[in-house]
Amino acid sequence: MAKLILSMDGLVLKEIQLNQERLSIGRKPQNDIQIDNLAISGEHAVVVTILADSFLEDLNSTNGTLVNGQPIKKHFLRNNDVIELGKYKLKYMADLQTGAAASDFEKNTAIRSGVLRLPSELQLAPTESPTRSNIGMASNPKPPQPTMAAAIQLLNGPNAGRELELTKTLTTLGKPGLQVAVIAKRPHGYFITHVEGAQFPVVNGKPLDAQAVPLADHDVIEIAGIKMEFFLRH
């Protein structure tokens, strides 16, 4: 499991295991990593961990966030990266045993470069069946099996009716600077996780929280004003 090592002036203060998908950093006590220092914003930054990979996002902090001496807004974390928050440092130590085999996230150049966007900005190739029935049906409470193929179909906007196959380990959806989420294909099903933006994705009319949520056949997702249906390829 990857971890962060918090230090100041060379003195190690704490070791934090990255055992949750969203880990907040800031001065306020509700943060997962609280740093009680005036140089740190109340909600300064967040580390999102999906599968074997993690990335860091600065939450418009007053004094900014540095990685290896360079200011960042979003940064894919690599082994031995040093995050600087004022006088404090967080060293990222990757789990190299699983990271080498599961680094599909790093292969995603859109995320690695810090540009998170809906693939082709919703310009998806049309399929033979531009419309589907049963949209908005009650969700199957059981998450889909990983052996099944899955896809999403756009329900509104100029590309309504078009579909996107969920063939990758991670599929990024949304509009950078507004709202971004990812759908992860895991051994026990497909999960959606909020990544960026004040507004959280909505599934079947219910806003999500910061945790990953399993998706079921015919779930209706809304991200950045775009509605889409998640479904299985039977």
Image (tube, rainbow, N blue to C red):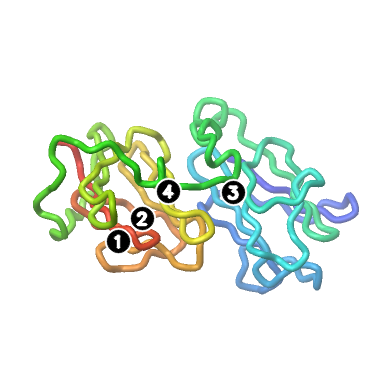
What is the C-alpha distance between the residues marked 2 and 4? 11 Å
* Image position, residue 68 (x, y; %): 79, 43
* Label 1 Cα crowd, 10 Å radius (few <14 / some 14-19 / many 20+): many
> Which amino acid, mark 1?
Val
Mark 2 or mark 1, which has the lower sequence index? 1
Q: How many marks?
A: 4
> Which amino acid, mark 2?
Val
* Image position, residue 216 (x, y; %): 23, 51
Indicate which label's residue lies in the foreground, 2 or 4.
4
What residue is shown with label 2?
A: 213
What is the C-alpha distance between the residues marked 3 and 1? 26 Å
Viewer-proximal residue, 134 or 32? 134
What is the C-alpha distance between the residues marked 3 and 2? 18 Å
Residue at 65% of width from left, 68% of height from top? Answer: 43
Residue at 68% of width from left, 72% of height from top? Answer: 42
* Image position, residue 36 (x, y; %): 76, 71
Residue at 64% of width from left, 41% of height from top? Answer: 77
What residue is shown with label 3?
A: 18
Mark 1 or mark 4, which has the lower sequence index? 4
Task: Give the farthest residue toward the top.
Answer: 101
SS of the residue under disc 3? loop
Q: Are marks 3 and 1 in contact (CB under 8 Å)?
A: no
Viewer-proximal residue, 146 or 192? 192
Mark 3 or mark 2, which has the lower sequence index? 3
Q: Are marks 1 and 4 in contact (CB under 8 Å)?
A: no
Q: Are marks 2 and 1 in contact (CB under 8 Å)?
A: yes
Quadrant in the rendering for residue 135: bottom left
